[in-house]
Image (spheres, grey):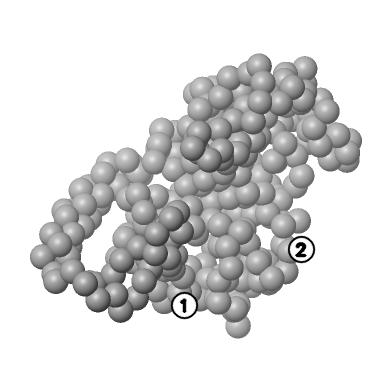
Amino acid sequence: MYNKMACVQITKLDFHYDLKRIFTDFSLSLEYGNCYVVSGLNGCGKSTLLKLISGKKLCPYGSVNVCGKDPFRDTSTSNEIAYLSNDWGTNTVAYSGYNIPIQSSIQVKDMMVELRKTYVDREHILRKVLGINLEWSLNSISEGQRKRVQLYLGLIKPFKICLLDEITVNLDVLVKTRLMNFLKTESTENKACVVYVTHIFDGLNEWCSKLIYLKKNNDIFMHAMESIPGRDIFTYLLQEFMSEYDECEMEIEEEENKQPINRKNAGGYTPGVLHNYVM
């Protein structure tokens, strides 16, 4: 039986990419009305976690429940979720680059017109919070301004769950502060659940309700801010990361000393592997 207060319930999740296992028997519960900061060393599964919650990745049936539904198999959950990552307004061109910004002359005022008409008051608030000029064209603004446009369009529609994956990197400190205040208000007044993946902790000690620390060995630690010494996220995580990094270095050294597995790439640009390959 699911926790009635939980908007996200992950139960004994197993998930992997090809031969790389990300989560094993992983469980997590997120509740309405909280602002969560998620952090961990690179490769621990932070972005994958948000993709699973948002229904961008398929996982075993029954292991991820969002607002009482399977987010991948029941696409109606997209009406409850705002998911913002760094691949908005970009594409990947073979032999040229990854996540290249799309150079379009479209203006902000011509984007999501019906949505802006539906939520007029909310649109005005976000335009002020993010300092949006409706006359901006995507091909003539900075990276920070593009990010503000993405947030503006992605947050106009009310949400129950907001998933942010390193989304504030290009924002100046004033815009970021106004944005985080807006999201905090969403959690306190509208009881939304905000999940923020980041490695930049400035200004988050008071904003954050609970800190989620993911370790590469699949351990997960959730701390209420009151339990963190001095409510100082940076100092606490720096010490934890240094300790974990030393452990990872030892594991890598042990792995390198093992007998190599006879395995050969299938060739070309595929991630395939020829199993039982004999030298």
Q: Taking 51 as reference, is 263 left or right? A: left
Q: Quadrant of residue 6?
A: bottom right
Q: Amino acid at mark 2?
A: Ser
Q: Please tell me which residue is depicted at 38% across the width and 68% down the height of the picture.
A: 273
10 Å neighbourhood of mark 1: few (<14), some, or many (≥20)? some
Sooner in the amino-acid sequence: mark 1 or mark 2: 1
Q: Position of residue 90 (x, y in %)?
A: 60, 36
- Judge by depth and name the residue closer to the eye, 123 or 274: 274
Q: Secondary structure at mark 1?
A: strand
Q: Secondary structure at mark 2?
A: helix
Residue farthest to the front, as pictured: 279
**Residue 131 shows up from this direction:** no
**Residue 175 shows up from this direction:** yes
Q: Amino acid at mark 1?
A: Lys
Q: Position of residue 239 (x, y in %)?
A: 22, 47
Q: Quadrant of the N terminus?
A: bottom right
Q: Please tell me which residue is depicted at 71% across the width and 26% down the height of the picture.
A: 104
Residue where numbered disc 2 is placed: 76
Is 179 situated above or below 78?
above
Report how many numbered discs are placed on residues in the image: 2
Q: Position of residue 68 (x, y in %)?
A: 68, 72
Mark on residue 12? 1
Mark on residue 3? none
Q: Please tell me which residue is depicted at 29% across the width and 75% down the height of the picture.
A: 277
Q: Quadrant of the C terminus?
A: bottom left
- Judge by depth and name the residue closer to the eye, 116 or 249: 249
Q: Please tell me which residue is depicted at 31% across the width and 60% down the height of the picture.
A: 216
Is 20 situated above or below 82?
below
- Judge by depth and name the residue closer to the eye, 136 or 203: 136
